[in-house]
Image: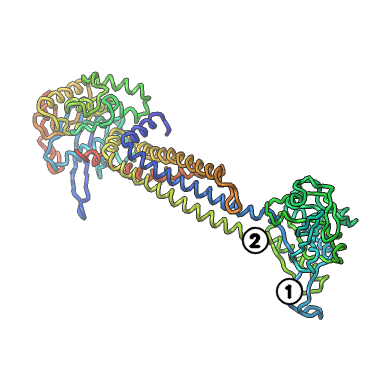
Amino acid sequence: MLRLSKINKYYAVGSHRLHVLRDVDLEVEAGEMVAIMGASGSGKSTLLNILGILDRYDAGEYWLGDTLIRDLGEGQAARYRNQFIGFVFQSFNLLPFKTAVENVALPLYYQGVPRRQRNRTALQYLDKVGLADWADHRPAEMSGGQKQRVAIARALITKPRIVLADEPTGALDSKTSEEVMELFGEINRTGMTVILVTHEADVAAKARRTIRLRDGKVEPELVARAS
Amino acid sequence: MFSLDRWQEVLSTLARAPLRSILTSLAVAWGIFMLVVLLGFGHGLRKGAESQFADDAANSVWVFGGQTSQPYQGMPVGRRVTFTNTDYDNLRRIEGIEHLTGRFFPGSGGRPFGGERPVRVGAKTQTFDVRAVHPDHLYLEKTLIAAGRFVNDADLIEKRKVCIVGIPVAEFFWHTTDVIGRSLEIGGVAFEIVGVFNDAGGDDGELRMIYVPVTTAQLAWNGADRLNALLFTVGDKDIDETRELLDRVKATLADRQRFNPEDPQAIRVRNNLEQYESFQQIFWIIEVFVSLMGVATLIAGIIGVANIMLITVKERTREIGIRKALGAPPLSIVGTIMQESIFITAAAGYLGLVAGVGLLSLVASVVPENEFFGEPQIDLRIAIYANVILVVSGALAGFFPAYSAARISPVEAMREGT
């Protein structure tokens, strides 16, 4: 489903270059749920941005399905993000002035789906995360867990190839975290590929596989878990 | 680009900060308002100035006799040049002259102006200007015949004692303008009124006037065959063609009167076309200046919009980042911002346009038209320009903010404010 080979990424910091990702190789099968762990500064955010086509890389290859993601123009990158990737963020990143259903429908707006149709679809996805009753509420009226579930519905609405979650429970209490992770588990069981970035071990424990990053390298002791 | 969805996005964004939207609109509306008002008043000023030219044909040339300042063919300096009917006949043959007339001022003794004569009807006597002219004079002064007719060729040939009086003359003597067939005495000679005239310029001095056939006047007031001035129009010739024609006229006159055609004093020329064009130029400059002030005001408004849009973009950085992460193409981001900006300038601009036009019509209805200030108005062309300027300026005002919005990196944008 997803293959990174010898990905290298540099950041220019002042006059010298910072080597943030060093020869990262990574393969994720369709339907897998993978956790990426690492200390801050290990390069895990950069890796996630590259996976999410939000950032470019300097060397190597990134295959998403049968599509080579490299040197894309802004427009093409936006299109691929919209079609292939569902994002879930630590801070939810919902638009505060839009209702839950409008937030969920937003990715379809950029696919040119007519308003009525995309709102109907959005309502179905809200129902899947158990928030059909909250469709017309704005994010400010919801709890953290509810907001994150809206964000998950939004990530799923385009039927992406992968769902990328960046510290999805980072802003939630432990009980809500558990519920949200439960939801990710359910999504994964429907066959969706899920990649989580986290620094919490118990969150990573829900994943079938954990990849550890240290100083921009994938740690060799790759822990494969029995599923 | 103009989908319903996009409009909803734009309008909801504007509605989120109503006070700001209104203040921004005011800046643009004010700019357009000033532009329209200044252009309108500039136009009015020009109209007023042009009306001063209206009583004389703008394409006319007046030639008066002068005194030679150079010896020529054995003739001495200081010789007076006086035109005669022969000169008139000679000019008649010059191609390019549209309308030609001589002028003879009874009792002027050859001076270029003058011609005031006592006019008597019954016991009433009053002094009026008397001009003896050819039939074409009608076109030179843009004389409007209110009743009857002007001097014609038969009058000249038969030296008829007929005259055409201005409306004030008729009203002075008879308190009516219905005076055709009545007679009056000019300097002791009786004339029959065959026409009453008005003047395009509406100048009272031009109306307190009596026209008589040139041949009659020459006979009646001992004018022999003298003419004080020769006036002609040049049709639609431009300045250069007019000068060229004038050279031929000078040569013709010089040849018969035997003066040096290069002598600047021998005859004096008033070229109305040249005056008119220099006048036009002055008003063109005024209009340009006034427009520049209007445009400058408008630019201030546009900069205001651009500024506000930049702030808006800054405030919405996070939102734009989220949208980009979800797959909003840069074009969509740019398009939304531009549309917002064009919408706000166009909508506000229309308000300014309407207010400006409203003020102009108000002024036009309150202030009577006079010679300094014609009806202030703004023609359709300017309204169309204003529309184009609005849309273009809205696009410009939106471009830089939109450009900066499109460059926002989604990763960094979403980090903002978390």
Which residue is located at x 28 percent, y 29 percent? Answer: A98
Would residue A180 be visible to someone looking at this image?
yes
Query: Is residue A221 found left or right of B273 in the rendered image?
Result: left
Residue B240, how many percent across, how many down? 68, 61
Q: Secondary structure at mark 2?
A: helix
Mark 2 neighbour density, 10 Å: few (under 14) some (14–19) many (20 or more): some
The residue singled out by tag 2 in the image is B275
State whether residue B46 is above or below residue B323. below
Q: Amino acid at mark 2?
A: Gln
Which residue is located at x 87 percent, y 54 percent? Answer: B155
Q: Amino acid at mark 1?
A: Asp
Which residue is located at x 76 percent, y 79 percent? Answer: B77
Q: Secondary structure at mark 1?
A: loop
State whether residue B124 is above or below residue A192. below
The outermost residue toward the front is B123
Q: Which mark is residue B263?
A: 1
Query: Is residue A99 found left or right of B104 in the rendered image?
Result: left
Which comes before the other along the chain, label 2 or label 1? Answer: 1
